[in-house]
Image (cartoon, grey):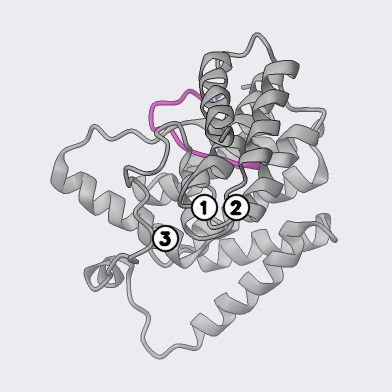
Amino acid sequence: MPTRLALLVCSALLAACSPTTPLFIAQVTTHEVAEYKTLKSNRMTAAIEEEGDLLTYSAMAIRDAKSAQAEQTYLAGYHDKKLSPEVRAIALYQIGLIYMSRYNDERNDEKALNCFYQVQNEFPGTRAAMRSTARIELIRQRAQEPVQKTSRELLAHWQPSQNLDLYQASLDPDMTLLSRRAVLKDRVAEAEELYQLALSDSGVQADIKAKALYQLALMYLAPDNPHANRDKAIAYLRQLLVQFPSSELTSQASRHLDQALNQATP
């Protein structure tokens, strides 16, 4: 089963995506029964609010009670020696984040701890290893709490953050959930690093690199981004069009480039 870079490096979202679809460039489906959709959406949003490092695919696994399936997908990326240590470490790190989420009905702190320790032992010095240390400490602190609430009990009293409407109209419809969250939570620089991993990894396919460039451009064009940068967005769009002229994103990238250039002209 082919699982390249995408399978973990950035992850994102499409309920109907095939196992070969790059997780960080898929899109969120919205065709669900209203009440059930609301419950699932609240679970995913709550998980994202609590843990900013969750990739979209990970958040969707929590939402849909598919932790084991996500684990297998990430493990495929972890075992892919064509990928860089940074990307492979992210795969294990995401498994840990999924199982430690308090909003996950399939929460398993012991499994999460094992993943974080494995990241530290096998990939020391990576971003994931450094962040695993903080997550290990957090799990230990939670274990000392006198009352251990279930995910459903937590959701019953959960209220959404006022600055995390992932589906607000001002966000470009082509943006992945990862990009949307990054813009709204002022974490674009971190998301940029993640997308850059896709661009710099020799094991990543051309279509994934094109999609990473497109997401980078959309984030820097977003009016909700406190650090919006039209020049950077234009550079990313031009890079996409020059390096990947046959990409399925050519028309969208060209349209955004034209709009950005016209806006930049007095």
Against 49, residue 154 (above or below) is below
Against 145, residue 209 (above or below) is above
Kindly identify which residue carries mark 3: 47
Q: Position of residue 59 (x, y in %)?
A: 45, 50
- The amino acid at mark 3 is Ala
Viewer-side label of 1, 2: 1
Q: Tell me the element at label 1.
A: loop
Viewer-side label of 2, 3: 2
Q: Tell me the element at label 2.
A: helix
Q: Are marks 1 and 2 in contact (CB under 8 Å)?
A: yes
Kindly identify which residue carries mark 2: 188
- The amino acid at mark 1 is Asn
Q: Are marks 2 and 3 in contact (CB under 8 Å)?
A: no
Magenta span: 8-19
Write the residue at 81% across / 61% down. 121
Q: Tell me the element at label 3.
A: helix
| Quadrant in which the C terminus is drawn | top right
Residue 105 seen from this side? no
Q: Residue furthest top?
A: 246
Q: Are marks 3 and 1 in contact (CB under 8 Å)?
A: no
Q: Position of residue 17 (x, y in %)?
A: 45, 26
Label 2, label 3: how many angstroms apart (C-alpha)? Answer: 19 Å
Q: Main secondary structure of the magenta part?
A: loop
Q: Residue furthest front?
A: 266
Kindly identify which residue carries mark 1: 225
